[in-house]
Amino acid sequence: MLSALTDAFGERASVAQAVREHHGRDESPFDPQLPDAVVFARSTEDVQTIVRLCSQYNVPIIPYGNGSSLEGHLLAVQGGVSIDLSEMNRVLSINAEDLTVTVEPGISRKQLNEALRDTGLFFPIDPGADASIGGMSATRASGTNAVRYGTMRENVLSLTVVLADGRVIKTGTRARKSSAGYDLTRLFAGSEGTLGVITEITVRLYPQPEAFSAAVCAFPSMGDAVRAVIETIQIGVPIARVEFVDALAIRSINRHSNLTLREAPTLFFEFHGTEAGVKEQAELVQELAAQNGGEGFE
């Protein structure tokens, strides 16, 4: 198996200890579990070659993006081959007219938004790390923007996937709606690398907001904060982000960042839209927060 990988990929197939250690850990608290080899893929055809060899020799496969997982997805618990997709980081096509972009899996969300900077569009899913779009798709990532823009589940339109036997399939299209058969795109979005290796992704884009505004507000209890959020969503305020932080976490934030936030259940908000729209959203949320005991809305 290793000989075949070396013949096919040369120096892009590595068994070096440092390389294996880098690919055998993530941001989770679990102990490192090293793969037996790491191969750096540059195309769908490269991934096909690796997967076919692994299938032939009955060797496990672990797709690798940016290594930012918090849940141990990357750990090679049975050894095997780590397929590093970080060199597959191109933007394949920007389709501004239908608000979509097609990319390779190794591009990170920040790299994607940098590439979109001059189009007036942006990709809003923000899981808190500069994760790869392939990894975000495979783990169905979300983040604090999900309240307005949804998760990866709602924003992945089409995938190119290399299956376990090396076959390549394409799921979905750029069309906004479809009633055609099995929804394979959403089967693979969230499969965590267990059904195939994603090599191309088409995702939704959104117009860059004219204005942004943020706010913070403390509450007497968790229940009061939750009710404020429920009422905000029920009356249709198009809030972009809302994050709940409990009193203990606020205490930790104050200690870590030398802040003076009130140590109480707290909501952090972000509003997107026009200048007038953002102002109106903030005023509505401030009123709802006050009705639920919110104090110090800022």
Image (cartoon, rainbow, N blue to C red):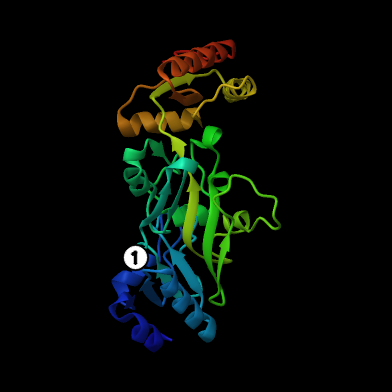
Given residues 160 and 190, the one toward you in this image is 160
Identify the residue under disc 1: 22
User: Which quadrant is the C terminus positioned in?
Assistant: top left
Q: Nearer the viewer, residue 264 or 93?
A: 93
Q: Is residue 53 visible?
A: yes
User: Taking 264 as reference, is 18 left or right?
Assistant: left
Q: Looking at the picture, does residue 117 appear above or below residue 34?
A: above
The structure residue drawn at horizontal position 49% and vertical position 48%, both measured from the top left corner, is 203
74 in relation to 237, above or below? below
Residue at horizontal 53 percent and vertical 65 percent from the top = 161
Q: Quadrant of residue 236?
A: top right
Q: Position of residue 91 (x, y in %)?
A: 37, 54
Q: Which quadrant does the N terminus fall into?
A: bottom left
Q: Amino acid at mark 1?
A: His
Who is closer to the viewer here, 69 or 151?
151
The answer to which image quadrant residue 169 occupies is: bottom right
39 and 122: which one is in front?
122
Q: Position of residue 27 (x, y in %)?
A: 41, 54
- The x, y position of residue 137, in whole percent, is 51, 53
Residue 237 sits in quarter:
top right
x, y percent for residue 68: 41, 54
Q: Is there any visible trace of residue 28 in the rendered image?
A: no
Number of numbered markers? 1
Q: Give the residue furthest to the front.
A: 97
Relative to residue 172, is residue 8 drawn left or right? left
Give the answer, above or below, for where 23 lies relative to 57: above
Task: Tell me the SS state at disc 1.
Answer: helix
Q: Residue at horizontal 55%, vertical 33%?
A: 147
Circle 1 residues within 10 Å: few <14, some 14–19, many ≥20: some
Whether 18 is drawn above or below 255: the answer is below
